Image (cartoon, coloured by chain):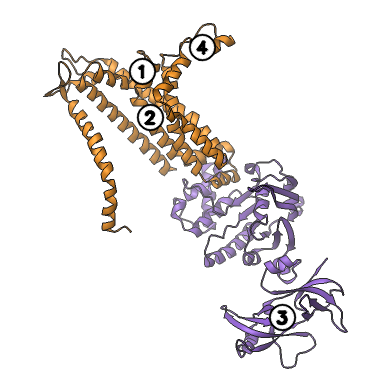
């Protein structure tokens, strides 16, 4: 048991973190929420009047001259959620078998492989994405290879499509799926796998009934860690999606930097946060419940 | 059916298994083991850690492939057959219960993966729960059970598929002494009721003697002795078995003849009379068990052998007292006399001389070839 004195002393350890997040995270968050209910100023900035049409523009009740409702915002929203979920699925399908394989290696090789997986973090994200531009563009590595091999007769359009955005996002977020998955698969007690096999379960049944449910927490953690940055991402669609595949992150960026409409940008950001929060609560509760039911 | 009853339930022939040691070189876990296991018996594989008993068990369950040799279960060769297709089930040392499944989910697992319909499954799970005394625990998770209860769930889970052979890998080692002893008796009666053959691995000789019909003593990948527990205790085949099973003092030496009886002369010059059997010139080991020793009567008859010793200490052990004595050459020897003998001992104080006696024919002599 930790005494009262002791727990107070331990709580003191939280002071730096609390101060930092309070000033640099909760503060701006509060400013953003307040701004999202204010009127945009004519030349940027805000007018201090209550104004709900920022949300109206997104959700469909705006009629003012400046703040017209446009279904394109909702469309971008849904596209972003769809791409983020697809990205979760892609990274999961790539990382799960890989993590299973790595967990079967010797300790020495496991350390090496995990190091290799974190290696891309040593290089700037923008540089790495520009490499993908070079690979995917019509005269790029992919097309010239396929053309050279005679597999295609004219360059295929990959860059500035959703496919390119998905490739890029899966690429940059793979480690965020791999590491939590690997951590939970490595923890899995191998004798449970043997017990399942001993009781007559085929490898496939063992995977579905033992390995998968036991590693569900890793899947959940990986999914959340990939979903959140995918939904808000604006660099990947900017570089690989061009103007065609606009995501919600690009929209927010445009509103703040180009259109200088801070209240509308804030409203969009608040919407992203709400959607994320709802989806994650729903998702985690589903997983929590399925574990109890089983 | 009659033919099958005559066959062995499991046979192992010339099993060899080597592992690569982490520091290089090979460890021979199984060094040419052959054995047969008969129907509905309680068989124990007994040996110190690293003797190969767990490897042998895993070769039968299919988790280890032999380097050479073969395993037959129910007369069929199982080389290359994966564990999930072998008609054996295992109770694991750490129980290996599925933490995400309830007690009935764990017990019914084997039936579920085999596609047994829900109704029959529920009925058989209920029966199994009843049998191991866990009725009413079906919805609990393994984490909510005590060690003994987890043990019972593991047992119920392993017998529900009605295996031809049940393998138990030191399942009682994590339990405390009292629980372990009551589980030993329960396992024994469960085996009797089910009529399934149990192959039980342990390093605990007491466990092996209590439960088994047959005990197989393994050492360094080889079989030392196969037989009923009484034989291991009273007629150990090798020095290793004599030391591993039961207490006792061992005297090794050469048999020399005298006028009447053969005499065993040890290296340090001690001469002890032995019973009939060994021939002159044999290298032999004599095992004197504590309960064979008493205080010499006033007028010992011809069948008694007398050893002069000094009492060192007496140790209370509950049912009996153990008297640790020292022979003239420094060898320590223990006596655990029965009630009447105990009274004679109690008159001797530590440090005083004592004359120990045993019947010449009682101790077993191992003749080394």
Which tint was used for chain A?
orange
Dot 1 lies on which element? helix
Q: Name the residue under label 3.
A: B329
Circles 3 and 1: CB distance less than 8 Å? no
Dot 4 lies on which element? helix
The mark lying in front, picked from 3 and 4, is 3
Q: In this view, does B176 lie above or below B335?
A: above
The mark lying in front, picked from 1 and 2, is 1
Mark 4 Cα shell of 10 Å, populated few (<14), some (14-19), many (≥20): many
From the viewer's perspective, tell me whether residue A148 is left or right of residue A39. Answer: right
Nearest the viewer among B10 and A4 is: A4
Nearest the viewer among B1 and B79 is: B79
The reply to the same-chain question for discs 2 and 3 is no
Residue B212's x, y, as percent? 66, 63
Spatial distance from mark 2 to mark 3, Cα to Cα? 81 Å
First reached walking from the N terminus: tag 4 or tag 2: 4
Circles 4 and 2: CB distance less than 8 Å? no
Q: Is residue B231 above or below residue A40?
A: below
Q: Mark 1 points at which residue?
A: A238
Tally of numbered discs:
4
Q: Mark 2 points at which residue?
A: A227
Name the residue rendered at 70%, 59% in the picture. B218
The reply to the same-chain question for discs 3 and 1 is no
Spatial distance from mark 4 to mark 2, Cα to Cα? 30 Å
Q: Name the residue under label 4.
A: A143
Which tint was used for chain B?
purple
């Amino acid at each position: 048991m930790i005494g009262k004195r002791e727990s107070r002393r331990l709580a003191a350890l939280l002071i730096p973190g609390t101060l930092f997040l309070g000033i640099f995270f909760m503060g701006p968050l509060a400013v953003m929420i307040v701004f999202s209910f204010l009127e945009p100023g004519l030349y940027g900035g805000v007018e201090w009047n209550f104004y709900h049409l920022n949300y109206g523009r997104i959700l469909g009740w705006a009629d003012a001259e400046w703040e017209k409702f446009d279904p394109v915002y909702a469309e971008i929203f849904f596209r972003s959620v769809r791409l983020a979920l697809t990205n979760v699925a892609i990274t999961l399908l790539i990382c799960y078998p890989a993590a299973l394989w790595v967990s079967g290696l010797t300790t020495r090789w496991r350390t090496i492989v995990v190091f290799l997986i974190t290696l891309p973090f040593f290089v700037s994200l923008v540089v790495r994405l520009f490499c993908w531009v070079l690979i995917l563009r019509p005269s790029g590595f992919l097309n010239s290879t396929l053309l050279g091999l005679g597999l295609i007769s004219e360059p295929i359009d990959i860059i500035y499509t959703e496919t390119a955005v998905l490739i890029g996002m899966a690429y940059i977020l793979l480690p965020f799926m791999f590491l939590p998955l690997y951590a939970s698969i490595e923890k899995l007690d191998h004798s449970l796998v043997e017990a399942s096999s001993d009781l007559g379960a085929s490898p496939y049944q063992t995977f579905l009934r033992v390995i998968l449910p036991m590693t569900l927490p890793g899947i959940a953690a990986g999914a959340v860690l990939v979903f959140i940055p995918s939904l808000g991402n604006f660099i990947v669609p900017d570089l690989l999606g061009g103007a065609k595949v606009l995501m919600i992150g690009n929209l927010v960026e445009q509103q703040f930097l180009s259109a200088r409409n801070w209240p509308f940008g804030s409203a969009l950001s608040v919407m992203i946060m709400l959607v994320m929060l709802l989806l994650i609560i729903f998702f985690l509760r589903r997983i929590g419940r399925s574990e109890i039911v089983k | 059916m009659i033919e099958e009853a005559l066959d062995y339930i499991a046979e192992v022939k010339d099993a060899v298994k080597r592992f690569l040691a982490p520091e290089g070189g090979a460890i021979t876990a199984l060094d040419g083991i052959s054995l047969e296991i008969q129907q509905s018996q309680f068989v124990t594989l007994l040996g110190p850690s690293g003797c190969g008993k767990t490897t042998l068990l895993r070769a039968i369950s299919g988790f280890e492939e032999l380097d050479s040799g073969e395993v037959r279960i129910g007369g069929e060769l199982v080389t290359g057959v994966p564990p999930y297709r072998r008609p054996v089930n295992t109770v694991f040392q750490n129980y290996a219960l599925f933490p995400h499944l309830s007690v009935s989910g764990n017990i019914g697992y084997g039936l579920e993966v085999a596609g047994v319909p829900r109704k029959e499954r529920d009925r058989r799970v209920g029966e199994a729960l009843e049998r191991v005394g866990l009725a009413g625990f079906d919805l609990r998770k393994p984490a909510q059970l005590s060690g003994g209860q987890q043990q019972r769930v593991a047992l119920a889970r392993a017998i529900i598929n009605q295996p031809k052979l049940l393998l138990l890998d030191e399942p009682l080692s994590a339990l405390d002494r009292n629980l372990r002893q009551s589980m030993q008796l329960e396992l024994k009666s469960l085996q009797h009721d089910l009529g399934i053959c149990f192959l039980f691995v342990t390093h605990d000789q007491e466990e092996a003697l209590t439960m088994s019909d047959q005990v197989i003593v393994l050492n360094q990948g080889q079989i030392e002795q196969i037989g009923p527990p009484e034989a291991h205790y009273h007629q150990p085949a090798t020095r290793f078995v004599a030391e591993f099973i039961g207490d006792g003092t061992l005297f090794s030496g050469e048999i020399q003849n005298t006028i009447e009886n053969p005499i065993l002369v040890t290296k340090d010059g001690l001469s002890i009379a032995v019973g009939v059997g060994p021939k002159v010139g044999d290298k032999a080991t004599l095992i004197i068990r504590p309960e064979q020793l008493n205080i010499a009567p006033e007028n010992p008859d011809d069948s008694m052998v007398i050893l002069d010793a000094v009492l060192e200490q007496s140790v209370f052990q509950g049912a009996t007292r153990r008297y640790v004595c020292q022979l003239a050459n420094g060898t320590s020897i223990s006596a655990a006399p029965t009630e009447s003998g105990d009274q004679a001992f109690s008159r001797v104080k530590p440090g005083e001389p004592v004359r120990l006696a045993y019947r010449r024919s009682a101790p077993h002599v191992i003749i080394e070839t």
